[in-house]
Image (tube, grey):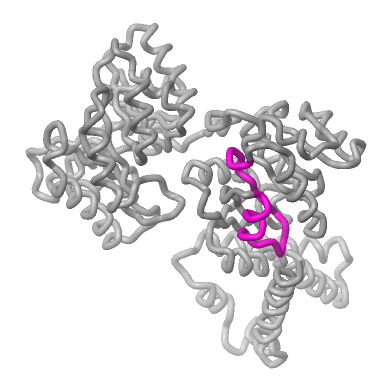
């Protein structure tokens, strides 16, 4: 296994080669070691190798590390805050960090200025711009940038030093260049506002060469130095002031509860329901239970609406009449058939998320479709996706896409199980015992899915063709599927599910 020192050597060689490759050998690119979730011991290994610039995203965790290292005498490190910044964390960040790279809205800039201790020099600030135009990404828009720059320049406890941007993960070279060039051009357009020549912080492990070719002055590298991040248990705790509540404690709430427990302590969670005996398993884990939905909202910052669709209108009415300022809560609904506009209208807040999980989420292998109302901030989205991450893949999109994912992934397991039933029945018909038939079918589907996931460079059609010899047994079976209208059957199956979804949305 490579040491951190070895990894750093490789990264510096990549940086040097990138500078040579784009004709910038005389320029210096700062390496920011992204140490979020990493222990002090690993930071000290990087320090021993000569690194002094470190980046963190979780304010509470970072503040503890910074204080400990300063107590140990490591006072020459420079700390950069690089993650989405909640307003309730600005005091912690203002008092501990040297640089904040993720200022993306006026209220955060103002709070950082007001809360920067007079005993410290002005806080260096980089404004984050959303250069990928992804709705789930933090950062101001290019149109919002000039006003935000003017504000930062006017604040005496802040010093504007540059811009930061993040390209879309998995983007091709042309898209990367377009994103990074956008940030470079903005820095040139507004260069007179910066304390010196504007710094550009752009580029990570996967795209540092492209970023450097487009003028980056600083690359943010974590995985290639410290290895894959091992997110600490209860990482979302850093982003929550209050509790998480579940209105309803049924099967899907129980599934989501297990995912939330990967992030929070059980005593931070409240579950409400009319039958205390059905909530006893939550209580035995250390969570609070109540029969009152409005009581569940006490101190709640996130509320999962986990009741049946026919019950939801009454629950929404009850919560709206409860006297609590609901705009301070992020609501996450899992009720099929209830569009965002209806939930938002009932609650009087646009901080509403719809989710559509599927049953494999129970074992952490699910797909959860998400769509966000317009009042849901980037920080809200990040928190929501962290709370749901233990269930498998999160897929954000529009409400129309949520319905499609619901039909494909929500209903899909039932369709797959029926296909498995049919295959198993045929195996038994031809002599296999039920247990062997089921095991063989399970392993076949599992193996095929894993092969597909590890062969993304090939289309599904190419993978199918690789199994098929013309005139062979697989070919004969596929011919029979076509003759009996397999594709038409699948089309009709999915369309029926979508039609029923539309019907429910019109009726409920």
Nearest the camera: 396 or 472?
396
Range covered by the magenta-colored residues: 326-347
Q: Position of residue 252 (x, y in %)?
A: 76, 50
Residue 45 seen anywhere in this rendered image of the structure: no
Q: Is residue 338 magenta?
A: yes
Residue 117 seen anywhere in this rendered image of the structure: yes
Q: Residue drawn 53% across and 61% down?
A: 397
Nearest the camera: 280 or 120?
120
Q: Position of residue 432 (x, y in %)?
A: 86, 69
In which image quadrant can residue 285 be found? top right
Q: Is residue 174 magenta?
A: no
Q: Residue furthest bottom?
A: 483
- Judge whether 308 appears above or below 437 on screen: above
- Judge whether 367 appears above or below 390 on screen: below
Q: Residue drawn 87% across and 72% down?
A: 428
Q: Residue drawn 71% across and 40% down?
A: 258
Q: Residue drawn 27% across and 39% down?
A: 219
Numbered disc total: 0
In which image quadrant can residue 298 be found? top right
Q: Position of residue 94 (x, y in %)?
A: 36, 22
In which image quadrant can residue 493 be found? bottom right
Q: Position of residue 223 (x, y in %)?
A: 40, 38
């Amino acid at each position: 296994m490579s040491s951190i020192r070895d990894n750093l050597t490789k990264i510096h060689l990549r940086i040097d080669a990138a500078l040579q490759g784009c004709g910038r050998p005389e320029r210096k690119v700062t390496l920011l070691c992204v140490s979020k979730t990493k222990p002090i011991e690993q930071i000290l290994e990087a320090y021993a190798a000569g690194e002094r610039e470190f980046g963190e995203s979780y304010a509470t965790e970072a503040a503890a590390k910074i204080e400990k290292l300063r107590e140990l005498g490591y006072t020459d490190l420079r700390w950069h805050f690089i993650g989405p910044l909640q307003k309730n964390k600005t005091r912690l960040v203002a008092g501990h960090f040297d640089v904040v790279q993720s200022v993306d809205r006026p209220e955060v800039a103002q709070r950082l200025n007001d809360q920067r201790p007079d005993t410290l020099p002005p806080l260096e600030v980089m404004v984050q711009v959303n250069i990928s135009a992804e709705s789930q990404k933090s950062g101001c828009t290019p149109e919002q940038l000039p006003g935000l720059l003017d504000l930062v320049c006017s604040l005496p406890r802040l010093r504007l030093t540059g811009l930061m941007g993040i390209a879309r993960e998995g983007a091709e070279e042309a898209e990367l260049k377009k994103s990074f060039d956008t940030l470079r051009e903005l820095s040139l357009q507004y260069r007179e506002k910066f304390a010196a020549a504007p710094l550009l912080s752009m580029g990570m492990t996967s795209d540092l060469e492209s970023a450097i070719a487009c003028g980056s002055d600083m690359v943010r590298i974590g995985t290639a130095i410290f290895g894959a991040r091992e997110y600490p248990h209860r990482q979302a705790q850093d982003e929550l002031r209050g509790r998480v509540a579940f209105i309803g404690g049924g099967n899907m709430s129980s599934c989501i509860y297990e995912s939330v427990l990967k992030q929070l302590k059980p005593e931070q969670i409240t579950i409400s329901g009319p039958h205390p005996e059905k909530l006893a398993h939550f209580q035995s884990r250390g969570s609070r239970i109540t029969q009152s939905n409005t009581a569940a909202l006490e101190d709640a910052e996130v509320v999962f609406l986990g009741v049946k669709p026919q019950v939801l209108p009454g629950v929404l009415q009850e919560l709206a009449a409860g006297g609590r300022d609901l705009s301070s809560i992020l609501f996450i609904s899992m009720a099929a058939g209830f569009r965002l506009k209806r939930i938002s209208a009932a609650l009087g807040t646009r901080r509403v998320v719809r989710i559509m999980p599927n049953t494999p989420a129970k074992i952490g292998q699910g797909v959860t479709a998400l769509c966000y109302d317009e009042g849901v901030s980037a920080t809200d989205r990040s928190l929501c996706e962290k709370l749901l991450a233990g269930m498998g893949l999160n897929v954000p999109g529009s409400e129309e896409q949520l319905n499609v994912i619901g039909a494909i992934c929500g209903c899909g397991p039932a369709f797959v199980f029926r296909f498995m039933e049919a295959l198993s029945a045929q195996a038994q018909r031809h002599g296999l015992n039920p247990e062997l038939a089921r095991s063989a079918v399970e392993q076949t589907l599992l193996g095929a899915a894993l092969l597909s996931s590890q062969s993304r460079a090939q289309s599904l059609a190419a993978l199918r063709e690789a199994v098929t010899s013309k005139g062979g047994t697989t070919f004969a079976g596929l011919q029979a599927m076509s003759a009996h209208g397999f594709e038409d059957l699948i089309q009709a199956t999915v369309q029926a599910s979508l039609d029923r979804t539309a019907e429910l949305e019109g009726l409920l």
